[in-house]
Image (cartoon, rainbow, N blue to C red):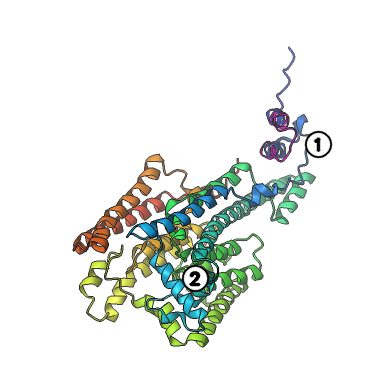
Amino acid sequence: MSKSKPKDPCKPAACKIQTCLREHNYDEVKCYDVIEDMRQCCLKWHKVSLCCSGIQLDLPGALPPREIRSLRIGPNTLIRVFLIYYGEVQDSLSDVQYTDVDYRVVTDGANHVLALGSPFKRHTYRYTPFLAYLVLPNLLVHPSFGKFMFSLFDILIGVLIKWILLNCYRSNKISIETKLLKLETLNNRNKYLIKRKNEILNSNNEALPPKYIRMAELSAYCWLYNPLTMIIATRGNGDCVSCSLVLLSIYFLLKNEQTNVQYFIAGLFLGLAIHFRLYPIGFCLAFYLATQNRTLEKWHDIVHSIMKPNSKQIALVLGTVVALGTTTAIFYWLYGYQFLYESMLYHLVRKDTRHNFSLYFYLQYLSSTLNVTILEKVLTFLPQLILILMLTVRYGQHRQTLAFGLFAIAFVMVTYNPVVTSQYFVWFLSLLPLCVKNFRNIGIRKAVFIPVMWFISQGGWLLPAYLLEFKGWNTFEFIWIQSIVFFFSNVLILQMLISNYDIAYNYKID
């Protein structure tokens, strides 16, 4: 009885290539996904598969430029343009203005700068003077120029999200394959395996399976098509500038090369982000610990690591100090102590007694005529400081978990802050897409429940806030109650995300 001939394991993949090429007029770019699937199959079965003859295994095809570098940003760009022009119409017809009041404040500050004065002559201007310089075209070109510029930064965030995820996937892929090949070459001196191992060790441009590219794109679209972030940017809020600087610092920090120069550049962007907004200060320790080469489990080891930095940590700190120190020194020289107080120190003692999402809102309202005591400030900031420290130690020590650690830190900072407004939400929403890949086990119910609960708790707050702001009703107590509901909703959401976070989905060998 004759034995049946074994099936070629890579024949189905080869057939798919032929079918795809015929359907797309033999355009290999459009069939890249199936060609890469064939190469991956041959990497595993090249010794037994006849279909793998002629397939280049040692030189993986580079991703086409449009696959790795571009996103379909046309539709969401048009949406943002529409919202900007819609805002102009609403502003002219309705008492409820679409344009953010802060946009008008920054534009007035730019008007003072144009007259060779200080932007801080404009009452309530409490931002970096850099922002006033950026919107000078509002006065010279068009009043909505700043909105278009902020929308470009908003789109840049989406592009950076994809770049960071592709880089992280590639880094994890190289790390896993290197470990596997090292194990194989211990007992197998096959020339191909040795060559492949050396290639991986010396390459930072490994091609990724298509599903990971698609996941990076979907994560970017979570930001690009988020209605809340689109509205915040097109209303003229500049927080997307600081968010894009934070993401640039993450991109350089997590690059595969891991040179001192890239850590210095990461520090430069982190320092600029802190200059624009103070909240990235909470990320500094996580950035610092992520540059080490080992896991620290005990507190005295962490302290020892901080006190005795390596060259990468020194480069990171130096870049941060140079950027933050230079910008602060320049504007202090131009505008004096007023710049230092209004753009930085004021935010440490700020009160919003009218209305804001914070749990501490009603306390601030009732004590608006009293001076803030040191004890009050300590008790206000202590809970979030403790949580930030715990999250940093738990997630900030590893490059693979850094993104989620930064998201959790930003979420805590916003939730526990004495003043919380809608634009603060972009601080953590810009980091959330970096973690979406790690929530695959969260389930449909939780995935729907979390955003629905978050938006409903906001909506419950917005109604009494609207009645107070535009109708003059005394709804302070109702706003306070809704602030409590919003606070505990955020606490529950963070608990659910932490419990469902799975590092295993950074990259898996199929």
Number of the label disc, if any, that sits on residue 54 = 1
Name which residue type carries label 1.
Answer: Gly
- The image shows residue 158 at horizontal and vertical percentages of 54, 55
Count of number-bearing discs: 2
User: Which residue occupies the foreground of this view, 119 or 303?
Assistant: 119
Asked whether, in this view, residue 83 is left or right of residue 69, the answer is left
Name which residue type carries label 2.
Answer: Cys
User: Which residue occupies the foreground of this view, 184 or 361?
Assistant: 361
- The image shows residue 300 at horizontal and vertical percentages of 46, 72
- The image shows residue 68 at horizontal and vertical percentages of 65, 50
Asked whether, in this view, residue 195 is left or right of residue 118, the answer is right
Task: Please report the residue visible at 54 percent of the width from the left and 56 percent of the height from the top.
Answer: 155
Q: Which element carries disc 2, helix, strand or loop?
A: helix
Q: Which residues are magenta?
A: 16-34
Number of the label disc, if any, that sits on residue 284 = 2
Quarter of the image for residue 467 reads bottom left
